[in-house]
């Protein structure tokens, strides 16, 4: 397993602690993970996910306020065994951004 450090200085969006289940689909198939935090720009998955930096996956976020999962393309920005895997969202549509923003606003309330 390759270990990379998370570059916290590159974040442009404030992350909010969450407990969401996310399916990550990539070359190795699909696997369920727990999201630890979330922002409009990305998220952090639990530490049991060995993915090298630059890996692209399709994420299905199961937001508790909706029946349908939110499908988003993401790229691994770094991994650290004790802190998880940081991911940035790629090419969010307006609808995806609105759904994420709506969910985050309710988390902050």
Image: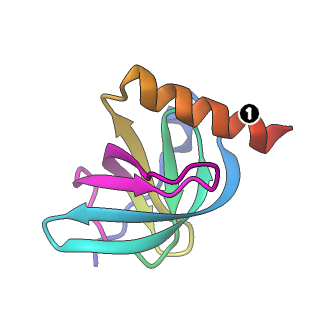
The x, y position of residue 70, in whole percent, is: 42, 46
**In the rendered image, the vertical position of residue 74 relative to residue 3, given as above or below:** above
Image quadrant in which the N terminus is located = bottom left
Q: Residues within 10 Å of mark 1 (few under 14, many from 20)?
A: few
The x, y position of residue 72, in whole percent, is: 35, 43
Image quadrant in which the C terminus is located = top right
The x, y position of residue 39, in whole percent, is: 58, 39
**In the rendered image, the vertical position of residue 82 relative to residue 56, given as above or below:** below
Q: Which residues are magenta?
A: 50-77
Residue, far left: 27
Whether residue 14 is visible: no
Residue 50 or residue 6, whichever sits in front: 50
**In the rendered image, the vertical position of residue 94 relative to residue 33, given as above or below:** above
Residue, far top: 94
Which image quadrant for residue 32?
bottom left
Report which residue position mark 1 lands on: 105
Residue at x-position 81% and y-position 39%:
108
The x, y position of residue 46, in whole percent, is: 52, 70
Residue 69 drawn in magenta: yes
Q: Is residue 17 left or right of residue 23?
A: right
For numbered disc 1, what is the local secondary structure? helix
Residue 5 drawn in magenta: no
């Amino acid at each position: 397993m390759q270990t990379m450090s998370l570059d916290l200085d590159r974040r442009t969006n404030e992350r909010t602690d969450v407990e969401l289940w996310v399916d990550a689909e990539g070359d190795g198939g699909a696997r369920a993970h727990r999201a630890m935090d979330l922002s409009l720009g990305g998220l952090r998955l639990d530490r049991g996910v060995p993915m090298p930096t630059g890996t692209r996956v399709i994420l299905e976020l199961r937001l508790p306020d909706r029946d349908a999962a939110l499908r988003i393309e993401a790229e691994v920005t770094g991994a650290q065994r004790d802190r998880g895997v940081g991911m940035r969202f790629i090419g969010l549509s307006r609808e995806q951004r609105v759904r994420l923003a709506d969910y985050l606003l309710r988390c902050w309330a």
